[in-house]
Image (cartoon, grey):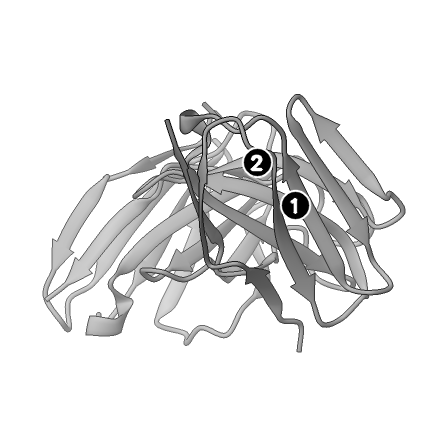
Amino acid sequence: ETGVTQSPTHLIKTRGQQVTLRCSSQSGHNTVSWYQQALGQGPQFIFQYYREEENGRGNFPPRFSGLQFPNYSSELNVNALELDDSALYLCASNSGGPGGVGDYEQYFGPGTRLTVT
Amino acid sequence: KQEVTQIPAALSVPEGENLVLNCSFTDSAIYNLQWFRQDPGKGLTSLLLIQSSQREQTSGRLNASLDKSSGRSTLYIAASQPGDSATYLCAVRPEGGSQGNLIFGKGTKLSVKP
């Protein structure tokens, strides 16, 4: 148990719809990251939030957006869903700052399985 | 562009064997390397984190080494058990990247047979 929770566990959406996925970080972890993991692949970094501001982004289009709240919860929103968005979405939290040196383990949640039909 | 490769993609061993999983990365400018375990359809469990200045880390039956200059890491599992069956992923945090920006390999799927 990492103390990071995600909801829902599974979700089925139709192409073109919008979806919101939720994550609750460990208490005291000000940094949360979101990853997309397609079947048979390693996770790919979507973006990171530190104290409610985005401060790092991977190669994902703007229709992937996020929010982070003061109570250690966060959301990943995806607009205009495409079939290729079907994946396991993982959030991870750590106690580090936004960047720079320092080694902080990433603690991952169990993920949300999104299927787009 | 940093790329992480894991060999082999899959491995099947009898219970009790010692085994080595390999991870290589193309750019040695990293802050750290982390090994994870993932059970089918589940999230990731952190196993070991090696800082760029370290050569190895140990936890129980697991030992991870890092050769930053050659872009290689190995995860050694001693006396394997059926409960070790899972996919093992390695990830690097590139220098200049944010804390959460990890670059992952595709993983090695390990099966330990009783």
Please state which amino acid type lies under the numbered disc 1.
Answer: Gln
* Quadrant housing residue B86: top left
Percent of width and height locating residue B20: 63, 45
The quarter in which the C terminus of chain A is drawn is bottom left
Please state which amino acid type lies under the numbered disc 2.
Answer: Ser
Residue drawn at point x = 42 percent, y = 37 percent: A109
Q: CA distance from mark 2 to mark 1?
A: 7 Å
Is residue A80 visible in this depiction of the protein?
no
Residue drawn at point x = 35 percent, y = 43 percent: A111
Q: Helix, strand or loop at disc 2?
A: strand
Q: Is residue A30 above or below residue B78?
A: below
Q: Is residue A33 above or below residue A18?
A: above
> Which mark is first along the chain, 1 or 2?
1
Q: Residues within 10 Å of mark 2 (few under 14, many from 20)?
A: some
Disc 1 sits on a residue from what chain?
B
In the rendered image, residues at marks 2 and 1 fall on the same chain: yes
Q: Which residue is mark 1?
A: B34
Residue drawn at point x = 46 percent, y = 28 percent: B15
Q: Is residue A14 above or below residue A26?
A: below
The quarter in which the N terminus of chain A is drawn is top left
The residue lying toward the viewer, choosing from B77 and A12, is B77
The answer to whether the residues at label 2 and label 1 have Cβ atoms under 8 Å apart is: yes
Residue drawn at point x = 57 percent, y = 60 percent: B6
Q: Which residue is mark 2?
A: B46
